[in-house]
Amino acid sequence: MSTVEEKIVTVKSRFVGGNLLAALWILLGTTVCWIVNPLFGWVFLGFSAVSIYVIIRRLLCNSCYYCKSCTKGFAKMSILFLGANQIPGLSKSSILGMTSFIYVVLLVIPGFVLANSILVEFTWFKLILLTGLLVISMFAIASRVKNRNQALWKPSVSM
């Protein structure tokens, strides 16, 4: 008697791409907050990095049972950033909650801070930062819409 299990095999391009998107988005949000107030920039960097790279990654990595090789949650985090609705071991409501948190932290907070800063004092650098923030956010949203019903991992069948 044999059982067939589906395991996640990390796709290197998605692994690197998703984690680079997360790091770039965090750094851009930190830069936005830093321009308004350097202390707020450090607080934002610490909060966003810890909440995403420690807490959400840990919530994604609940067991090595679902992965062929252990990546400590970074593979699932890259899948989450690239827009998957399906991640083995997680419900759709958990994925939706984590995604909503990510968008609030990385888009709404820096966007609101930068929009207020532009209203107080307009500079071209702030406008370029706002454009960059919106471009990265639109890329993430477009990726989410494109990949919403796809499995973004290579299934490996083991017996």
Image (cartoon, rainbow, N blue to C red):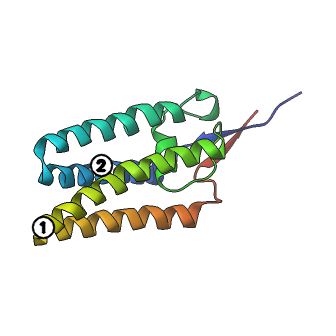
User: Is tag 1's residue or tag 2's residue first in the polypeptide sequence?
Assistant: 2
Q: Is residue 40 above or below residue 21?
A: above
Q: Is residue 119 above or below residue 31?
A: below
Q: Relative to the observer, which residue lies in front, 156 or 75?
A: 75
Q: Is residue 78 visible?
A: no
Give the alpha-carbon distance from disc 1 to disc 2, as whole Å.
18 Å
Mark identifier at residue 42:
none
Helix, strand or loop at label 2? It is helix
- Disc 1 and disc 2 in contact, CB within 8 angstroms: no
Type of amino acid at the residue the image marks with label 1: Phe
* Relative image position of residue 22 (x, y in whole percent): 36, 49
In the rendered structure, the answer to whether residue 38 lies left or right of residue 110 reads left
Q: Which residue is mark 2?
A: 26
Q: Quadrant of residue 95?
A: top right
| Residue depicted at 51% across the width and 44% down the height | 98
Q: Which residue is mark 1?
A: 125
